[in-house]
Image (cartoon, rainbow, N blue to C red):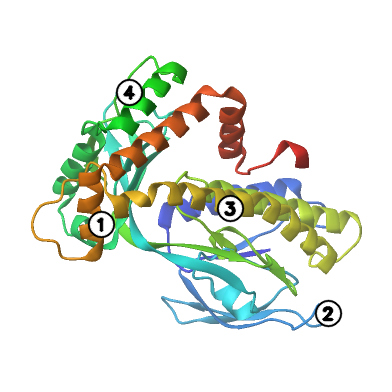
């Protein structure tokens, strides 16, 4: 088995190679010894896939070392593409993808927090221009994904690390907007009747950004019609890309890897080729039943908050009107449309929080990385 990384990740890859090689050696037998070859800081070139499944026609690729320009030719019975949303494996295999771009970008960075930070809790704050999400990965450390408009992302990336931390703390700690109007009054009364909230929450304070970790990427949705082709399988962002709204991207990728491993085990147990089309089709079917509903659900959450960009909200509008969107925002703010939408959405979220079956349904989906309706279990 071979594993090829296009970039050098130093200590991380060394630890990964050791753990994977150890696991392969422990699970090996004389008939099928466990072994792994890992190469990193390489470029994959000249990918060629068979047009149909055949015992003799295997995928071929050329691996070039970046530092020495040394080239190695490889043939394999099954090529797994885990090379991200801009997957060269997917493009070379000709697997069709559907999707669309969002007029937004996300800024990601690794953060340092104080000793009081509870790293068993993830935080998310919804702003008008997009959500901020904190995903913990250890004591006093977390990663942040800040989804926002392209212009705002450009401004944030131009800030120094210290200025970025100050802006992040300000956005996380600023008071919530209190909507007004008749609709807001009615929904407030209903929310008080059904709400179970009896405590307030204080988000963690960011101390600093780990140097060199802040970067920006465009947001989009994409989904492959199939996660497999002749002697090729796609996992992770190579097969599907979702919005970073609920931190489900990694869970989906791990689910893909686990499902593919079980698929290969089943094929070997039945004496089949590891790239047997029947087994790979089962892999695609099983994973798409998990990934597609979750992806479209997250797109629905995105659509739920998209009106804030059009109809406005707590964001104050100053200066001359420079676009039709800015004009709509001002008119909606004066007429109370933005506050009404905000109140109705808040009422719906409070209803979900108060209704245990509905809430548990969404919690289970987030934990397991799949939206599964009771009738289809």
Looking at the rendered structure, the secondary structure element under dot 4 is loop
Lower sequence index among marks 2 and 3? 2
- Cβ–Cβ under 8 Å for marks 3 and 4: no
Quickly name the residue at label 4.
201
Q: CA distance from mark 1 to mark 4?
A: 33 Å
Quickly name the residue at label 1.
328
Mark whose residue sits in front, 2 or 3 = 3
Residue 244 appears in the figure: no
Percent from the top left, x then y, of residue 119? Answer: 40, 30
- Cβ–Cβ under 8 Å for marks 1 and 2: no
Q: Vertically, is 130 above or below 42? A: above
Lower sequence index among marks 1 and 4? 4
In the image, 212 versus 37, the foreground residue is: 212
Label 3, residues with CA under 10 Å away: few <14, some 14-19, many ≥20: many
Label 4, residues with CA under 10 Å away: few <14, some 14-19, many ≥20: few
Mark whose residue sits in front, 1 or 2 = 1
Looking at the rendered structure, the secondary structure element under dot 2 is loop
Q: Vertically, is 330 above or below 201? A: below
In the image, 27 versus 138, the foreground residue is: 138
Quickly name the residue at label 2.
54
Q: CA distance from mark 4 to mark 2?
A: 59 Å
> Residue 225: which quarter of the image?
bottom right
Residue 374 vs residue 106: left or right? right
User: Residue at 28% of width from left, 62% of height from top?
Assistant: 150
Q: Of the numbered discs in the image, which one, if any, rests on residue 253?
A: 3
Looking at the rendered structure, the secondary structure element under dot 3 is helix
Q: CA distance from mark 3 to mark 1?
A: 40 Å
User: Residue at 24% of width from left, 34% of height from top?
Assistant: 177
């Amino acid at each position: 088995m071979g594993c090829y990384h296009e970039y050098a990740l130093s200590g991380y890859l060394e630890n990964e190679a050791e753990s994977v090689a150890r696991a392969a050696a422990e699970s090996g037998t004389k008939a099928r010894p466990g072994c792994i070859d890992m190469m990193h800081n390489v470029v994959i070139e000249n990918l060629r896939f068979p047009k149909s499944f055949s015992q003799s026609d295997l995928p071929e690729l050329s691996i070039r070392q970046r530092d020495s320009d040394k080239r190695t030719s490889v043939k394999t019975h099954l090529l797994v593409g885990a090379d991200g949303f801009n997957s060269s494996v997917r493009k070379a295999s000709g697997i069709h993808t559907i999707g669309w771009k969002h007029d937004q970008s996300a800024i990601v960075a690794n953060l340092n927090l104080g000793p009081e930070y509870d790293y068993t809790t993830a935080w998310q704050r919804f702003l008008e221009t997009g959500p901020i999400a904190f995903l913990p990965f250890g004591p006093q450390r977390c990663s942040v994904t800040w989804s926002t408009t392209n212009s705002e992302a450009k401004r944030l990336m131009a800030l120094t690390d210290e200025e970025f931390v100050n802006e992040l703390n300000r956005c996380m700690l600023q008071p919530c907007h209190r909507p007004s109007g008749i609709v807001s009054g009615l929904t407030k009364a209903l929310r008080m009747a059904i709400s179970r909230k009896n405590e307030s929450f204080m988000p963690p304070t960011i101390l600093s950004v780990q140097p060199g970790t802040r970067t920006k990427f465009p947001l989009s949705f994409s989904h492959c019609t199939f996660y497999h082709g002749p002697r090729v399988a796609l996992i992770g962002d190579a097969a599907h890309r979702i919005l970073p709204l609920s931190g489900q991207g990694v869970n989906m990728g791990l689910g893909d890897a686990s499902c593919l491993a079980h698929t290969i085990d089943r094929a070997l147990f039945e004496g089949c080729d590891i790239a047997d089309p029947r087994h790979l089709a089962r892999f695609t079917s099983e994973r798409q039943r998990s990934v597609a509903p979750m992806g479209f659900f997250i797109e629905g959450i995105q659509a739920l908050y998209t009106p804030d960009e059009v109809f406005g909200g707590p964001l104050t509008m100053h200066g001359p009107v420079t676009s039709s969107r800015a004009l709509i925002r001002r008119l909606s703010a004066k007429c109370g449309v933005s506050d009404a939408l905000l109140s109705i959405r808040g009422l719906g979220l409070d209803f979900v929080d108060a209704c245990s079956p509905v809430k548990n349904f969404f919690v289970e989906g987030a934990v397991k990385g799949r939206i599964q309706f009771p009738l289809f279990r």
